[in-house]
């Protein structure tokens, strides 16, 4: 059963506008969340993370919001750029331990010039 | 910058063949991982290793084995390849156990097709 869900397989956004990628999770024990970005023919690269003690973390154009009561997190990209076109994976971790990291199915973002 | 290198970008193998996927990292990371990525299923952990000669099963270890004889190298072995093992295989490494302040660094992947 998928513990981390990204219900939108794809998203298209105009350049300069905001991109919002969503992620839902079911396990209330998750306490650390990450976003990875993947270009075609490359491995995923770490983008941004957030601990469950926070509700927002910002890094340049990228902001991750966490709503623990709703078991929901989102990634905002402002302004969106064509180079942001990629597949974005949400991941969640329940404590330390290499086998405690769970990935979502990914959302393909296309930023239209 | 961490570099994780997977020896093959594309592989085509026949059903029943023994397949080796090789991965090398150059940052002296303790932990190495093998994932597979399939459409609609995301990334799923096959095996991981937190030290030389140590290995732990992930979520989907069936049909796979691993070998870690040296710290920098982690091999995934398909003892007898089957068509349902056609997938994108991703190797990763990290400095610390778990994900806190130690994100995974991935290789570029090996797309394996089993015919």
Image (cartoon, coloured by chain):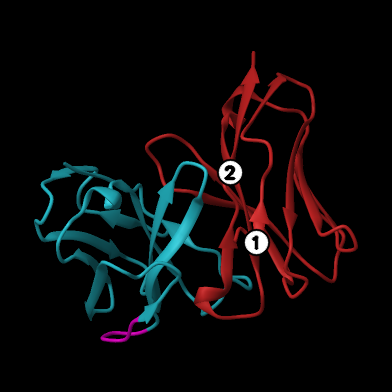
User: Label 1 belongs to which residue?
Assistant: A3
Taking the spot 55% from the left edge, 64% from the top edge, the residue there is: B103
Task: Kindly identify which residue carries mark 2.
Answer: A106
Question: Chain B rendered in what hue?
Answer: cyan
* Residue A26 rendering spot, x and y as whole percentages: 74, 63
Which residue extends farthest right?
A69
Residue A47 part of the magenta segment: no
Dominant secondary structure of the residues highlighted in magenta in the image: loop
**Residue A98, label in figure:** none
Question: Within the magenta stretch, is there residue B52?
Answer: yes
Q: Is residue A94 above or below residue A76?
A: below
Q: Can residue A62 be seen in the rendering of this structure? A: yes
Q: Nearer the viewer, mark 2 or mark 1?
A: 1
**Chain of the residue displaying label 1:** A
Q: Secondary structure at mark 2?
A: loop
Answer with mark 2 or mark 1, whichever residue precedes in sequence: 1
Rendered residue at 62%/70% (across/down) = B101
Look at the image and give the residue range highlighted in magenta.
Answer: B51-55
Using the image as rendered, state which of residue B4 and residue A52 is in the foreground.
Answer: A52
């Amino acid at each position: 059963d998928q513990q981390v869900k990204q219900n939108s397989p794809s998203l298209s956004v105009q350049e300069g506008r905001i991109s919002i990628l969503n992620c839902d999770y079911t396990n209330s024990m998750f306490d650390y969340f990450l976003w990875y970005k993947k270009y075609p023919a490359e491995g995923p690269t770490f983008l941004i993370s957030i601990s469950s003690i926070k509700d927002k973390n910002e890094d340049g154009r990228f902001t991750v919001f966490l709503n623990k009561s709703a078991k929901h997190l989102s990634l905002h990209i402002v302004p969106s750029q064509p180079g942001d076109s990629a597949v974005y994976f949400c991941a969640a971790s329940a404590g330390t331990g290499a086998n405690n990291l769970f990935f979502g199915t990914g959302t393909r973002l296309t930023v239209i010039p | 910058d961490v570099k994780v290198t997977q020896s093959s970008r594309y592989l085509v193998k026949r059903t029943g063949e023994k397949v080796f996927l090789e991965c090398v990292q150059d940052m002296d990371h303790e932990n190495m991982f093998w994932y597979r990525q399939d459409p609609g299923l995301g990334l799923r952990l096959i095996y991981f290793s937190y030290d030389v000669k140590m290995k732990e099963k992930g979520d989907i270890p069936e049909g796979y084995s691993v070998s870690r004889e040296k710290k920098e190298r982690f091999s995934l072995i398909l003892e007898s390849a089957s068509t349902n093992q056609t997938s994108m295989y991703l190797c990763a490494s990290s400095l610390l156990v778990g994900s806190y302040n130690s994100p995974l660094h991935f290789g570029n992947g090996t797309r394996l097709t089993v015919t």
